[in-house]
Amino acid sequence: MSSAMQRKMGAYKIIYFFILLGFVLFLVTCSGAQSDKPSATSSKTTQSQVSESGINACKLLTREELEPAIGGEIAGYGELLQHGPGNSECLFQYEDNRIFVRYKAGTSSFDYNKIMAKGEPVSGVGDEAYWYPISKTLEARVKGNTLEIEMLFPPNSASGDLKSAAIELAKKAASRM
């Protein structure tokens, strides 16, 4: 075998080695990231757990504040759902009426929705707020973070003015962030 052929074979071996090394690193990285994610069965957390920022969405509003808006007595204190670092979501429910309270670190989702969803501006809530009538969600920018109050009620429920209720709830929650 000629020396040129040997150099070419050596170069292929080096390239193959780096490709294999990259693939192994990719697999190790993916498997490590996968283990940090909660599984579908562990997505619900206890109320004492909070987002990395220290904000617990279930603690932003009290039962006494929520019950008039939801239309009845809430059983328990809300169900905290954790969706990732810096996020906290709490579900409050009475019969088919549900209120989600969400805290999101940063404002990327707020900024995106502001541009894409074209909500109705709301004054007096946080630094800036919008009401999105299709999703029945009030989203506010508060101290560099995002607060969402989503009012999920059946279409024929006698729920009153969801927008006004969401605004009042958001004002109270924002004051606790």
Image (cartoon, rainbow, N blue to C red):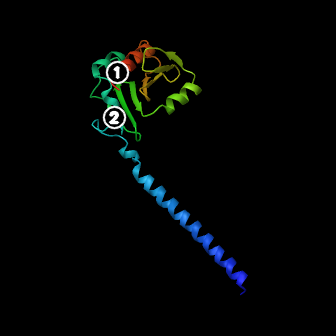
Q: Which residue is mark 1?
A: 175
Taking depth in this image into account, of 78 and 147 the one nearest to the observer is 147
Q: Which label sits in the foreground, 1 or 2? A: 1
Q: Residue type at mark 2?
A: Leu
**Does the residue at mark 1 contact the one at mark 2 (Cβ under 8 Å)?**
no
Taking depth in this image into account, of 158 and 28 the one nearest to the observer is 28
Taking depth in this image into account, of 58 and 103 the one nearest to the observer is 103
| The quarter of the displayed image where residue 149 is located | top left
| Image quadrant in which the N terminus is located | bottom right
Q: Residue type at mark 1?
A: Ser
Q: Residue 56 location in percent, x, y?
A: 33, 32
- How far, Cα to Cα, is label 1 from label 2? 20 Å
| The quarter of the displayed image where residue 160 is located | top left
Q: Kindly identify which numbered label has been placed on residue 131.
A: none
| Crowdedness near tag 1: few (<14), some (14–19) or many (≥20) residues, C-alpha within 10 Å | few
Q: Residue 147 location in percent, x, y?
A: 42, 27
Q: Which residue is mark 2?
A: 80
